[in-house]
Amino acid sequence: MATAAKDIVARQAVAATIKLTVPAGAAKPVAPVGPTLGQYRAYRLNLMAFYKDFNARTQKYKPDTPMAVKITAYKDNSFEFTIKSPSMSWYIKKAAGVDKGSARPGHLTVTTLSVKHVYEIAKVKQTDPFCQYMLLESICKSIIGTVNSMGIKIVQDLE
């Protein structure tokens, strides 16, 4: 019974949940991040601490890589945040060398992508905290579905 009481006390009241897409290593008080977080000034978030911590945690990525961030602000003026790796479609477009998918997927093929690319993207996505317990095969199947919906053909080897 004592541990249940400790768990209830340890939980903090959530004041706001903020979702952003921020380029890796580029969190600054200027647009687009600064004004978006400025809306939550009432929660007295330490924005400089967020910028420094975010930039430190995303320094292993190439600059301008879009990172999805979920910030949870608590009523005691503290916060925590989780960073997700870029979306599968972003990795697919980078690997395929295209800016966007097909206007008519299934009818018009934009480019091709090798099975090796799919595997490499799956290995990167498996490091994402939300995918770390998924099988690599399941992630590959999800990537293949996304590739097909973008009008990209998967081949065994690129020629």
Image (spheres, grey):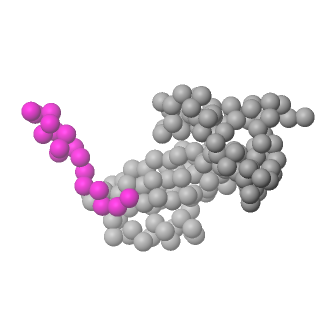
Outermost residue, right side: 159
Outermost residue, left side: 1
Quadrant of the image containing the C terminus? top right
Asked which quadrant contains residue 154, the reply is top right
Q: Position of 141 compared to 115: left or right?
A: left
Q: Position of 110 compared to 105: left or right?
A: right
**Number of numbered callouts drawn:** 0
Residue 98, horizontal then vertical, whole percent: 79, 53
Residue located at (30% from left, 61% from top): 15
Residue 18, horizontal then vertical, whole percent: 42, 60
Outermost residue, front side: 107
Give yes or no for residue 6 being in the magenta stretch.
yes
Magenta stretch: give its range.
Answer: 1-17
Residue toward you, 107 or 68: 107
**Does residue 141 lie above or below 151 as drawn?**
above
Residue toward you, 49 or 67: 67
Give yes or no for residue 133 being in the magenta stretch.
no
Residue located at (73% from left, 50% from top): 106
Q: Position of 45 compared to 159: left or right?
A: left
Residue 41, horizontal then vertical, whole percent: 38, 69
Residue located at (58% from left, 28% from top): 136
Query: In this rendering, does residue 29 appear at all?
Result: no
Residue toward you, 50 or 94: 94
Query: In this rendering, does residue 65 appear at all?
Result: yes
